[in-house]
Image (cartoon, rainbow, N blue to C red):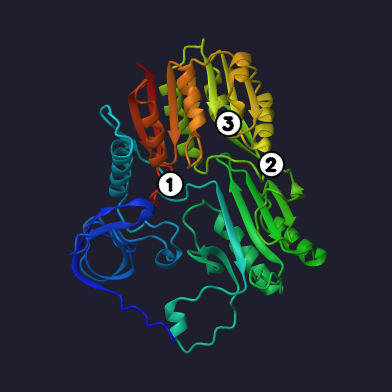
Amino acid sequence: MARRKKTPTIFENIEVIDAGARGKTVAKAPDGRVIFLTNTVPGDVVDIRTGKKRKAYYEGTGIKFHKYSDKRTEPVCEHFENCGGCKWQNMAYEHQLAYKENEVTNNLVRIGHLELPEVTPILGCEKQYFYRNKMEFSFSNSRWLTLEEINSDEEIDNRNACGFHISGMWDKILDVKKCHLQEDPSNDIRNFIKNFGIDNNLEFYNPRAQSGLLRTIMLRISSTGEIMVVIQFFKEDKVKREALLNALSQKFPQITSLQYVINGKGNDTLYDQDIILFKGRDHIFEEMEGLKFKIGPKSFYQTNSTQAYELYKITRDFANLSGNEVVYDFYTGTGTIAQFVAKKAKKVIGVEAVPEAIEDAKLNAQFNSIENVEFYAGDMKDVFNNAFISKHGQPDVIITDPPRDGMHKNVVAKILEISPKRIVYVSCNSATQARDLALMKEQYTIVKTQAVDMFPQTHHVENVVLLELK
């Protein structure tokens, strides 16, 4: 017997009151439960159709708008309704900043029960569009169709697409004509590759059948104007591959690094793949305050170069170095922060779990002639032990920039045991940051906190906190 489909609940004339986690907005249902919404802005008054109903909340969508919020603005991107990448593009930037700052403060106070000094206003980003230095696009021969296309009688012959995965649909790709996240010639390069593929019968990838030729593109454009293009093919077809790569390098002679991958495995991650150089060099350079950083296809580098510089300046300022300090830089990545603060420290010790990142860090330090930095690969909770401290000396300052999950509780415990004078905690997730800071509040006072917007038009926000020993 077929299960009866539940009829969705409709709530009428509901005011959207706040912005919540993961880019959703928040309203209150008549029964007092919270409703999380995906297509509204705080201040909108809407009728809501609920999808999921949980014990404490609903998930829903605005289906009729009675009043539009004065916080709204017109999205600049033609793909806004369908893409889901820049969820806040319909909210004016000053309001995005206000909600981000508010989220950070709320997390620190509500989750961490922390006493905060006067909060420094969030640092906004000068470039609200075209700010990313790295983008990845996927090919598919089963392009995602809009409702209009589905409902029309028009015959759709070409289903080839190059763009982004539709949220929740691993096999459907939204075809992107113009993306507002990476500066020119990003869109021109992507569209050229896509059109060349269509015109020359290069098969677009089919994730369900695991077939096709063109799989993904990775584009990096550095702040110095250098360009890296890495094209991922599902299988080797020398004639078609070389035709595309030659045409691309002729059309865009400014490409600094043109590379490719043959990847026939189930997922398209590049980290376990051999990346082959076709033309130019196998890396590009980023530059920051006279320091050069070599970036390869697998390198991690903050994806907003301009704002990363602002973030690092705040980190260095909070560290308040005089030239005599031993600094530990945890989760150092390719050692950018370590090298950025090195000239004001006695020595800097960087630790990172990814061995390739540490190799990059060592090369970059050599390249920049920085001799007072050392880098070690390993899991932080294993590396950061008594032998390590005995070898490198008691740190005066610890800078930590962990992944979204925050620091392992053993790392926090070890920091508390050795009690450095200052800790600068950089975080991309203020909820886990608040959890970690709560473990330190008996020993440390929060002296400063500064949110930094690295990703305009999205809900993501970085936060830097300075702790001093009581």
If the image is split into quadrants, where does the C terminus sit? top left
Residue 166, x across and y down, in percent: 50, 66
Badge 3 local density, few (<14 within 10 Å), some, or many (20+)? some
Circle 2: residue type: His
Q: Is residue 335 visible?
A: no
Give coordinates of residue 82: x percent, y percent: 43, 67
Residue at horizontal 66%, vertical 70%?
204
Residue sitting farthest toward the top: 324
Between marks 2 and 1, how big is the CA–CA gap?
25 Å
Which residue is under mark 2? 283
Q: Residue at x 74, y 50 (%)?
A: 275
Instruction: Give the distance between the C-alpha atoms of the residues marked 3 and 2, in whole angstroms.
Output: 28 Å
The residue at 58%/77% (across/down) is 159
Q: Nearer the viewer, mark 3 or mark 2?
A: 3
Hey, what amino acid is under mark 1?
Phe
Quarter of the picture containing the N terminus is bottom left
Q: Name the foreground residue: 408 vs 293.
A: 408
Residue 19 in the figure: left or right of residue 409: left
Kindly give the residue lying farthest to the front in the view shown: 1
Q: Which residue is mark 3?
A: 380
Q: Which residue has dot 1 on it?
A: 455
Q: Amino acid at mark 3?
A: Met
